[in-house]
Amino acid sequence: MEKGLPAVSMRNITKTFGSDVIANDSVDLDIYRGEILSLLGENGSGKTTLMNMLSGIYFPDSGQISIDGKEVTIASPKEAYELGIGMIHQHFKLVDVFTAVENVVLGLEEKGKLDLDSAAKRINEICDTYGFDVDPKQKIYDMSVSQKQTVEIVKVLYRGADILILDEPTAVLTPQETDKLFAVLRNMKEDGKAIVIITHKLHEVEAISDRVAVLRKGKFIGDLVTKETNAQEMTNMMIGHAVELNIDRPEPIDPRPRIRVDGLTVRTQDDILKLDDVSFTACSGEILGIAGISGCGQKELLEAIAGLQPIESGSISYVQDDGSYESLIGKDPLEIAAMGVSLSFVPEDRLGMGLVANMDLTDNMMLRSFRRGRSVFTDRKTPKNLAEKVVDELDVITPGVSTPVRKLSGGNVQKVLVGREISSAPTVLLSAYVVRGLDINSSYTIYDLINQQKKNGVAVIYAGEDLDVLLELCDRILVLCDGKVSGIVDGRLAEKHQIGRMMTSLGGDELG
Amino acid sequence: MFDLISFIPRAVVQSVPLLLGCTGETISEKSGSLNLGIPGVMYVGAISGVIASFFYEQSCGGQVNPALAIIFPLLACLFGSLLMGLLFCFLTVTLRVNQNVVGLAMTTFGIGFGNFFGGSLIKLTDSEVPSIALSATSHCFSKALPFADDLGWFGKIFLSYGFLTYVAIAIALVTAYILKKTRTGLHIRAIGENPATADAAGINITKYKYLSVCIGCMIAGLGGLYYVMDYASGVWSNDAFGDRGWLAIALVIFTLWRPNIAIFGSLLFAGLYILYLFVPTGGNMAVKELYKMLPYVVTIIVLVVTGMRNKRENQPPEALGLPYFREDR
């Protein structure tokens, strides 16, 4: 393929945080117009950092960036925009209480009066060109994740960007929304724009990109033409050694009902119905997956079981081995945890629930165990040993167990959280988004951990975002749609688009 | 009988310092800076004006030129408040010190600063009472339109005030317009809501924060100046300004960060603040004190109500009180 002059060429880019974290180590990267480039790498491999330097959020310690062959320095996001570079961040950079159009014109220093109406008109034109659907007058907090992402893309296009960077754009989308996004990206490619998509989902790389560039531990490993490579080769480059790409799914051994949920209805404080008449049974030695678009009640369901969410009606009971029932309703979270029900929830910001960012690993381990202490003084030795064990067994990358959790990269934080929850030897493991934002290697470590628990006879409830994983990991999948049970399917037989449809409409029939 | 025609003008003059303080604090808070130093800033604004006018009156021996008598204290007041604003910004924006700590320290400092120089001036005059009277300057500040008296109750309620009253209302209206309708306002609000977003959109956070806080402080400082020169008829006595600065901050919450509402909000607060003077309490101090609590009770009620309604637009700016550092991970 004749490529011509690269739109962006980065040479010898190095960036360090503090004295000991090297995020990028003399990286060379070329980005061409009319091409979609996938930037592939594990967590902490420096993909986002590299792109942040291109979009002016960070400034490189050394190295040279050229745009269309001209050497430039990008000191701020504004200068990046002026050079035609726009980045759609993983965590959306939108002001919630503003409307779409206000967010789009934000930061533009145009002459004359602020004219939101003509800006709205231009937004509609952009939408028509590429096939988006945005209401310029809608408030951001009223929008779905996919709509917010669209606003982000429109914002970048409105500024005339022709080099677009998307940081894990599909992490929060349903398969249908992803297809729509990819169609738009292809339109933009045809339009001669240079597009970089940061991801660690290999099938997406294969679906959308023309070229793949791989980073590993901050270093540029190489680039490949997508058509000429395959998932195994890319993974090997990413990890540095061969990795088995299949998720293990052992047959459940002696499954018995463990948690029975019947007619569960939950309403939030703002009187929004979050769960409506949900019933199911989770069995020991089995992984029950929960699928659904974000915000459709998975979180509330798990919290209700863990005793964190007040419920309106229905029952939740814990079934003992001898078949006797014990209701979990009315028990406080501590009592429920003492019965062996353990919740590991990874929220969008990864740190919100379960771990205290400013405390070190040992202290975070203590959050689970300090109540068991008998004396006035805390026992720091056991949690320290546990922390060391978790670090050791799960390959947590940290300077030591006395490092504040906040300084760890996202994947490592999650390993600490899951490691701690599993260490308490639960009989029911509730896990939500435990691999959110994790790279392949770490994800597989966590799948292994979960499978290990399953083999030990734990009833695992796994709420996840990635349908491919749900389909490979879970024995049964409960699909939620708007807080109602859309159906429970067999993980071995179900098909991805069928679940996708069930997520968006009850039973999944209407759309055929 | 409740005398409305004398009550309203009293409430209006009482409301002006609150309105100016509230407008200033709103601008600052909209940019994400919770400036609890406002009470101190108002003291500094007041005493700066007093110092300037004291020396001007001394130098011309009572025969003041009205224009200069207004300009000197005004400039001194704005300058003093500006310095306080710069101090707040330098500490919280540039050095990223905790805003609450800086704000409270500035309030303590400002009140002390005011009382120290007030006390010094009182010493200089060798007066019998612990206060300074700047009646000539005050006369210029509080001069109402000459025909206001001829218009009966209408003139009394609407036209009987010094020029700063109308300036205060104008500032509130202009501020509301700028915050809501202009690009600058959009940028300021974005910074207060989500600085990372504003930054990624190419807005110069440091510039806007300095600008908002400093202008906010200067407006609030005017409130202090108004209090001494107009409301108190040019009489400075230590600690007389009282807790009006805190009332102004409470008013920001009460008005849901909208300076145009603050015009009425400040009038309501001021009315409640002086209600005890107009309601026959029969010299019962306890009842009097209960009446004085009213503005604060109303603030709490508003907080409860807005908290329950939970409408997103009525919530405080999301990043209020948080320092911003681009490369923070």
Image (cartoon, coloured by chain):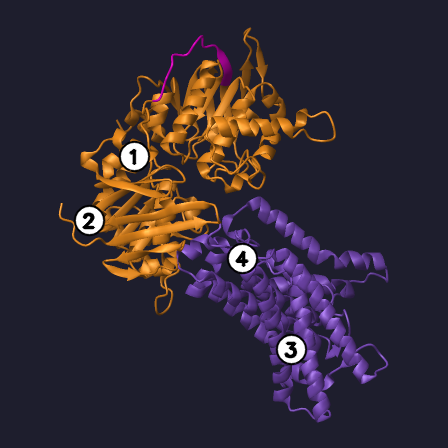
Q: Report how far apart the C-alphas of labels 4 and 1 lie in the structure.
A: 45 Å
Res. A34 mark: 2
Residue furthest to the top in view is A322
Q: Earlier in the sequence, mark 1 or mark 2?
A: 2
Question: x, y (%) of residue B17?
Answer: 65, 69
Amino acid at pointer 2: Gly
Badges 3 and 2, same chain: no
**Location of residue A368 by image quarter:** top right
Badges 2 and 4, same chain: no
> Could you tell me if the residues under marks 3 and 1 are in contact, i.e. CB atoms within 8 Å?
no
Q: Residue at x 51, y 16 (%)?
A: A259
Q: Nearer the viewer, residue B167 or B29?
A: B29
Q: Which residue is mark 3?
A: B161
Q: Colour of chain A?
A: orange
Q: Nearer the viewer, residue A48 or A270?
A: A48
- What chain is colored purple? B
Q: Residues within 10 Å of mark 2 (few under 14, many from 20)?
A: many
Q: Mark 1 against mark 2, which lies toward the viewer?
A: 1
Q: Report how far apart the C-alphas of labels 3 and 4 lie in the structure.
A: 34 Å
Q: Which residue is mark 1?
A: A237
Which chain does tag 2 point to? A
Q: Residues within 10 Å of mark 1 (few under 14, many from 20)?
A: many
Indicate whether residue A251 is drawn in magenta. Answer: yes
Q: Which residue is mark 4?
A: B32
> Could you tell me if the residues under marks 4 and 1 are in contact, i.e. CB atoms within 8 Å?
no
In the picture shown, does residue B171 fall above or below B320?
A: below
Seen in the image, is B9 located left or right of residue A295?
right
Q: Range of the magenta residues?
A: A247-261
- Dot 3 lies on which element? loop
Q: Nearer the viewer, residue A220 or A254?
A: A220
Seen in the image, is A323 located left or right of residue A201?
right
Is there any visible trace of residue A481 in the rendered image?
Answer: no
